[in-house]
């Protein structure tokens, strides 16, 4: 595993090599901004799912908003910003540990970027594992985490906020799941090249 602050770049030579070997380019957004825009409906859906699970145990109190006579202000404790960034890395670390042999792989990366962070691998993985890697942070934090903390009475306001933010942040992961599920046949392998993904059916 390597740690770096820039997302791996698209390699034209690798692209041509993959195509010559029978890999098929997956149609997907080519940058994070476009991915976020396409993911907005998923942000709403996933946020509402997490919100609904939290409300089973404890109503959400929006006390971060101070509303007075038709106007409002937002009070944010600076420590919350640090906690949010820690949670971003927890989210990415969950992705990372789902990648086989991530510690010894020279093609797997954990990065710090302007949008927080990323986990990325150029190892060849199968379709089902790819979907699992995308799905796990939402499942572990915003579903199982909420259920466990709800049963234990540990859903504090900041934890509620972070679980909902994690669900919203998982929207790009779910967009990837949709793209892979609709374009890649079962029993296929997937490999990354920068922001581009390719698949090849297992023979």
Image: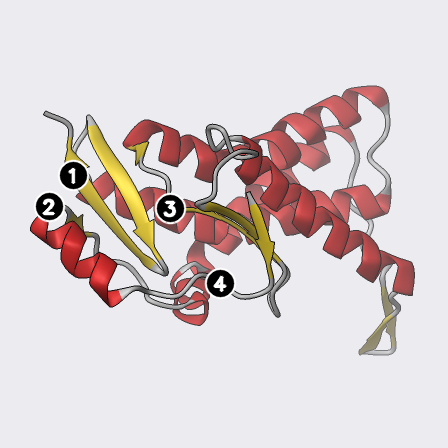
Residue 6 is left or right of residue 33, and the answer is right
**Residue 122 badge:** 3
What separation in Å lies between label 3 and label 2 (alpha carbons)? 16 Å
Q: Mark 2 points at which residue?
A: 21
Tell me which residue sits at (81%, 52%) in the image.
83
Q: In this view, does 91 lie above or below 38?
A: above
What separation in Å lies between label 1 and label 3 (alpha carbons)? 14 Å
Question: What secondary structure is found at the residue carrying circle 1?
Answer: strand
Q: Of circles 2 and 4, which is in front?
A: 2
Tell me the quarter of the picture where residue 130 sits: top left
Are dots 2 and 4 in contact, CB under 8 Å?
no
| Image location (x, y in percent) of residue 114 | 62, 70
Are dots 2 and 1 in contact, CB under 8 Å?
yes
Residue 153 is left or right of residue 200, and the answer is right
Tell me which residue sits at (36%, 48%) in the image.
176
Question: What secondary structure is found at the residue carrying circle 2?
Answer: loop
Q: Mark 1 points at which residue?
A: 200
Tell me which residue sits at (29%, 32%) in the image.
127
Q: Name the residue under label 4.
A: 7
| Label located before the other in sequence (1 or 3) | 3
Structure colour scheme: secondary structure
Tell me the quadrant of the picture where the N terminus can be found: top right
Is residue 77 at least partly visible in the picture? no
Residue 184 is left or right of residue 109, and the answer is left
What separation in Å lies between label 3 and label 4 (alpha carbons)? 12 Å
What separation in Å lies between label 2 and label 1 (alpha carbons)? 9 Å
Using the image as rendered, state which of residue 14 and residue 112 is in the foreground. Answer: 14
| Label located before the other in sequence (3 or 4) | 4
């Amino acid at each position: 595993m390597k740690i770096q602050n820039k997302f791996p770049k698209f390699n034209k030579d690798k692209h041509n090599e993959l195509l010559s070997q029978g890999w098929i380019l997956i149609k997907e957004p080519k940058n994070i901004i476009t991915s976020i825009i396409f993911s907005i409906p998923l942000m709403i859906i996933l946020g509402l799912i997490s919100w609904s699970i939290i409300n089973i145990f404890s109503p959400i109190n929006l006390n971060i908003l101070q509303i007075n006579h038709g106007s409002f202000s937002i009070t944010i404790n600076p420590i919350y910003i640090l906690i949010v960034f820690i949670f971003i890395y927890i989210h990415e670390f969950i992705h990372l540990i789902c990648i086989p042999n991530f510690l010894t792989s020279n093609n797997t990366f954990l990065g710090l970027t302007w949008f927080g962070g990323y986990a990325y691998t150029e190892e060849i993985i199968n379709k089902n594992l790819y979907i699992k890697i995308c799905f796990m942070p939402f499942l572990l934090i915003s579903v199982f985490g909420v259920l466990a903390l709800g049963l234990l009475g540990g859903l504090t306001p900041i934890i509620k906020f972070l679980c909902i933010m994690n669900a919203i942040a998982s929207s790009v992961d779910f967009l990837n799941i949709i793209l892979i599920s609709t374009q890649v046949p079962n029993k296929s392998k997937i490999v990354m090249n920068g922001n581009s993904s390719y698949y090849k059916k297992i023979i």
